[in-house]
Image (tube, rainbow, N blue to C red):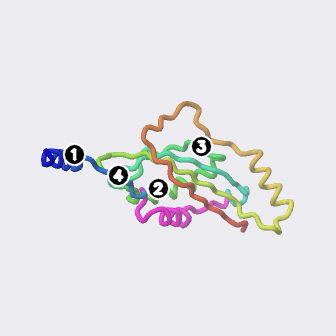
Amino acid sequence: MKKAILIITLFISIHCTAQEKLAFPFQGGNRVMMQFFKDSLKVSPEIIRAKATGMVIFKFSADEHGNIKNLVIYYADDAILAGPAVEALKKSDHKWIIPDNEKLHDFVLPFLIKFNATPDDNMETQKALHYFYAKRKPIVAKDQIPLNLTTLLPEILVTYNQE
């Protein structure tokens, strides 16, 4: 009887596995991803001139080879912020890791692009920041967006200085 219980227990334990821990979905991990995007995202002169600050949120799929597919802008505080982030995302092809036995995996990746304010900024700089905020033209979804099984990634923070 004890042998039968032991064999059944062993048989059941072979078929049971612990919850699979997913690796970070960017080759090299979180810190490498953050550094990659800080190095790859080039803030345009138009953004600097406008003192543009804001968030851009993307949804994209990665295939089993790490290629980006189906890039969608979910939200952007202004269209001028989206361009440099799209270019940086294009450079990340072949760097994404998806879970085993999936052909595509969806990710949501927020970018926060902001002006590095300093204590000696004058009224003109503050006016430019307020002007941008008041005149911004957000990109927003007008209809539902299905998320399915999506991984929300940490926010990419990119700061820039006035030239």
| x and y, in percent, of residue 49 in the image | 72, 59
On residue 12, which mark appears? Answer: 1
Contact between labelled residues 2 and 3, with CB atoms less than 8 Å apart = no
Q: Gap in Å between the C-alphas at discs 4 and 1?
A: 18 Å
Label number found at residue 75: 3
Kindly identify the residue that appears in the image at 49 percent across and 45 percent down: 59
- Tag 2 secondary structure: helix
Spatial distance from mark 3 to mark 2, Cα to Cα? 18 Å
Where residue 127 sits, quadrant-wise, is bottom right
User: Which circle, 4 or 2, is nearer the viewer?
Assistant: 4
Q: In screen coordinates, is 43 left or right of 1?
A: right
Residue 65 is left or right of residue 92, and the answer is left
Q: What amino acid type should be assigned to the residue bearing mark 1? A: Ile
How far, Cα to Cα, is label 4 from label 2? 29 Å
55 is within the stretch colored magenta: no
Do labels 3 and 4 touch, CB within 8 Å?
Answer: no
Which residue is located at x 46 percent, y 47 percent?
151
User: Callout 4, which amino acid?
Assistant: Glu
Q: What's the residue type where badge 3 is placed?
A: Tyr
Q: Is residue 117 above or below residue 99?
A: below
Between label 1 and label 3, give the one nearer the viewer.
1
Extent of the magenta region: 25-46
Residue placed under numbered mark 4 in the picture? 20
In x, y percent, where is residue 154? 54, 55
Where, quadrant-wise, is the C terminus in this rendering? Answer: bottom right
